[in-house]
Amino acid sequence: MNILPVGIIGTGKYVPDKVLTNQDLEQMVDTNDEWISTRTGIKERRIASSEQASSDLAYQAAQIALENAGITAQDLDLIIVATITPDMAFPSTACVLQEKLNAKQAAAFDLSAACSGFIYGLANAANFIATGTYKYALVIGAECLSKITDYTDRNTCILFGDGAGAAVLGVVPEGRGFRSFELGADGSGGELLKIAGGGSRNPSSPESLEQKQHYIYMAGQEVFKFAVRIMGSAAEEALRKAGMDKGDVDLLVPHQANIRIIQSSLNRLELPEEKCMINLHKYGNVSAASIPIALAEAVEEGKVKEGDCLVMVGFGGGLTWGASVLVW
Ligand code: UT7
């Protein structure tokens, strides 16, 4: 089989207008700006309105990515939405989005890999295009985490925000595009980060509501240790598979969970902060949307040039992780 070079040909992002600051959170739970800033690096996050669901955020990001790619929604063959906050259990948010975009030719499905979902989505879409099965794919990370956050739990409510990031994939000139993917999972850590209720194990019930099973539960310290270990090793493995080295990296686009996790990845990869896209102070942790929002913003800000070597790396619930090396 002939394998074609595949890359990202357009990016876009959307974040809701409403801003939730650390000072706002001080009024809601026993916390303070100093603690949140030093422990996480987050200053504020965006919050969707009561009318907005993940597909609405995805739609806005998709429109910009399609325009930047110079194609229309009708050209799309595939839509993948990575999310842990789908509009509903089913139909998939990807199908809802397909209808909103009028992308009649596109197959559409959601992908569940939590914060690693965008990298998992890229890997899936890239393979379809590399083999010639499809010509254009839209990969989106879209989240309304505010809708599954317990704003009485100071361990989690300070972290999360809402938004969407999109990428259009297509065939690119030889020598450019994706060089490697490194995906992984460790189901034994599933209990560390989860929403226990609302599925077939613990269906929604008055008891599940009372026990707050529909909100994010996280064992923060355990997830932190896992993240510090896996971010560096996944990025290094992706570089090794690409036949590249730490010294080749022009820009790291990491999952925006905690500034201390990002800094430990930079240390391990021996990269200065200028070679890293950091925007978590503005948006907090947006799960699957964090990496594509950061990527779209890096492009907007002119931080990505043709031929640059990008490393995207993320981790999340599952547990899962994913990294990719991409020549822009
Ligand atoms: O993308 C999904 C993956 N999730 C993550 O990446 C999160 C990974 N984990 C983390 O980023 C960090 O573990 C947190 C930011 C969640 C917490 O930071 P930490 O340095 O691990 O703090 P901790 O949980 O060890 O708590 C330290 C202290 C505790 O008080 P005591 O027991 O030492 O008296 C907490 O009760 O800080 C307290 N604390 C807070 N204080 C003020 C916990 N949350 C807060 C808060 N404000 N919001």
Image (spheres, grey):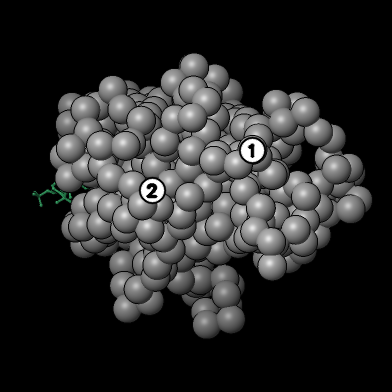
Q: Position of residue 304 (x, y in %)?
A: 47, 24
Q: Is residue 306 visible?
A: yes
Q: Is residue 75 above or below residue 238?
A: above
Determine whether the residue tagged by mark 1 lies in a helix, strand or loop.
loop
- Mark 2 or mark 1: which comes first in sequence? 1
Is 123 in front, or is 57? 123
Q: Which residue is mark 2?
A: 313
Residue 1 falls left or right of residue 141: right
Is 186 in front, or is 167? 167
Q: Position of residue 178 (x, y in %)?
A: 52, 47
Determine whether the residue tagged by mark 2 lies in a helix, strand or loop.
strand
Q: Which residue is mark 1?
A: 173
Residue ID at (72%, 31%): 69
Residue 267 falls left or right of residue 289: left
Is 284 in front, or is 244? 244
**Type of residue at label 1?**
Pro
Q: Nearer the viewer, mark 2 or mark 1?
A: 1
Is 229 in front, or is 83? 229
